Image (tube, helix red, strand yellow):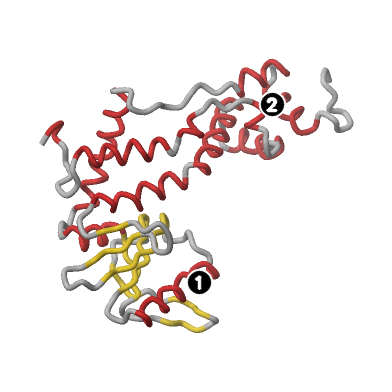
Amino acid sequence: MADNYKISFIAQNDFEKHVAKTIANYNETLKSINLNKFNSNIVDPIKLTFDKALFKKSIEEIIELKIHRQRDKSNTNAIGYFHQYMFKYIANCEVPSHGFDVIVTRKDSTKIYVEMKNKHNTMNSSSAQKTYIGMQNQILNHPHDMCFLVETIAKRSQNIVWRCSVNGLSVEHEKIRRVSMDKFYELVTGIPDAFFQVCKQLPITIDKLIKTDVVETVKKDTVIEELKSKNPDLLKAIYLLAFETYNGFEVGK
């Protein structure tokens, strides 16, 4: 295959297009972060002081880590898009505009209705209960179909009955299952290492898109420079951001 492409069940052009669209969802977080944006929720200088000392990092490193965390929170939806919309390019799968995340049509015309989560601990008990009840209703109305909770990062590779607490009672149904992403890919494609193929190809494709200028990468942030313009001592500058109007914290002290 061209470029030694490693995925046997998605066309290379489709995969590259999908990765490019996912990166496009990062665009807002790729923009330069200035001091106003960095401090939009007022940075806690006390916490940064502890972090600096206990993690044995420079204040510059602590600030960079905080900027990264701010970006990371915003990128959760982009990763969800990547996992869900990948199935647009896989045979017998559809990504509906609302409701379940993915619907798989099997050879016998029965369907699998899928709710996707990134991590096994993403849902709290209330969210899990609501999701399970929705799946129960789906099975009641379509008893030949199945419902899956598919987890990208599950505790282990699995395809098991989902046992859930609903109104304080432990419930389970053979057709409502908890499935790791690798097992879901295997079920959909018939290829045991299908998800591994995606993971192996992904960094290659991202690098290719970056090198060919198909996508942008992160812009230079100005937070540290702006802080230094307030006070050459970055830790003092951080304190002034939060406490400038507090007694004793006046600029120049």
Rendered-image quadrant of the N terminus = top left
- Residue lying furthest left: 1
Q: Quadrant of residue 191?
A: bottom left
Position of 166 with respect to 49 (left or right) is left
The image shows residue 15 at horizontal and vertical percentages of: 25, 41
Mark 1 and mark 2: span between their CA atoms? Answer: 45 Å
Q: Is residue 240 above or below residue 46?
A: above
Measured from the top left, where is residue 111 in percent x and y? 27, 70
* In this view, 42 is above or below 233: below
Residue that appears at 33% across and 23% down: 213
Q: Which mark is residue 130?
A: 1
Q: Position of residue 50 (x, y in %)?
A: 66, 38
Callout 1: 10 Å neighbours few (<14), some, many (20+)? few
Image position, residue 165 (x, y; %): 49, 78
Figure label count: 2
Query: In screen coordinates, is 7 left or right of 199?
Result: left
Q: Which mark is residue 94?
A: none
Q: Residue 235 — which label?
A: 2
- Relative placement, left or right, of 52 versus 214 is right
Question: What amino acid type is highlighted by mark number 2?
Answer: Leu
Q: Which amino acid does the dot numbered 1 rest on?
A: Lys
Residue nearest the viewer, comparing 99 with 114: 99
Marks 1, 2: nearer the viewer? 1
Q: Of label 1 and label 2, which has the lower sequence position?
A: 1
Circle 2 sits in a helix, a strand or a loop, which is it?
Answer: helix
- The residue at 35%/62% (across/down) is 150
